[in-house]
Amino acid sequence: MSRKEYSTDNLKHTRGRSVVHQRHTLLKVTYLKDSTSAWITDAAEVIGINLQDPFRTTVSINDKMKVPFRIGVHEAVGGDHDFPNPGDLLCASLASCFESTIRLISNKLGIELLETKIRANAQVDVRGSLMIDKSVPVEFQSMHIDALIIAKNSNEKLLKTLINGAKLSCIVYQTIKKGIPITLNTDIKIK
């Protein structure tokens, strides 16, 4: 499915009620006038504290808010896995971006979401990272998303448009899939 096929531009009946459409319209005008204003930078920063502890640190997320988030090292590479590890954060980024994208698109499509549950997981063979087997790449080999969406006042075609739109518009999904395969299993229900 192409971007044009999932476009919400032809859904005039939902435009007036969609707060997302209203905000996107304003942003579109701004970005068309000045394309450089569409460039953003997301950030996270780790400032090493307690450097004698090889298994735990803190990452500050977002330059403005500096939200501190404790992270640990996975037990598969020698850590205690007593806090989320970087792989967990990668999965969290994928799941949260995909779910947020579903929310935005469903608002534009006039779909009333009753429930969403997005679970992302990633598979990696850590022998490469530990230099046990140099033929094993040091990277996640695959990722997977399980998506449950329960919606009201919708139909299968519209919900398929929603999922395809999310796949095409989710920045984290599109970034990761360039490097590793992402499979997607959807469970869509209409009430």
Image (cartoon, helix red, strand yellow):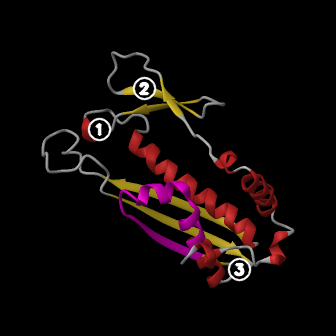
- The quarter of the picture where residue 41 lies is top right
**Which stretch is magenta?**
164-188
Q: Is residue 30 left or right of residue 158?
A: right
In space, the residues marked 3 and 2 are separated at their CA atoms by: 45 Å
Spatial CA distance of label 1 from label 3 is 44 Å
| Residue count near mark 3 (Cα–Cα under 10 Å), binned few <14, some 14–19, many ≥20 | some
Q: Which residue is mark 2?
A: 57
Residue 7 numbered mark, or none: none
Q: What x and y, as percent, mark residue 142?
A: 34, 59
171 part of magenta stretch: yes
Quadrant where the C terminus is found in the figure: bottom right
The image shows residue 67, relative to residue 114, as above or below, that is above
Q: Are marks 1 and 2 in contact (CB under 8 Å)?
A: no
Which residue appears at 63% of the width and 56% of the height? Answer: 100
Graded by Cα atoms within 10 Å as few (under 14), some (14 to 19) or many (20 or more), the crowding at tag 1 reads few
Q: Residue furthest right?
A: 16
Residue carrying label 1: 75
Which kind of residue does numbered mark 2 sit on?
Thr
List x then y, in percent, for residue 47: 47, 21
Please give the residue where the numbered disc 3 appears in the rendered image: 154
* Quadrant assignment, res 166: bottom right
Q: Amino acid at mark 1?
A: Glu
Q: Nearer the viewer, mark 1 or mark 2?
A: 2
Q: Give me the residue at 34% from left, 20% from top.
A: 53
- Say which label, 1 or 3, has the lower sequence index: 1
Q: Residue at x 36, y 56 (%)?
A: 179
80 or 163, nearer to the observer: 163
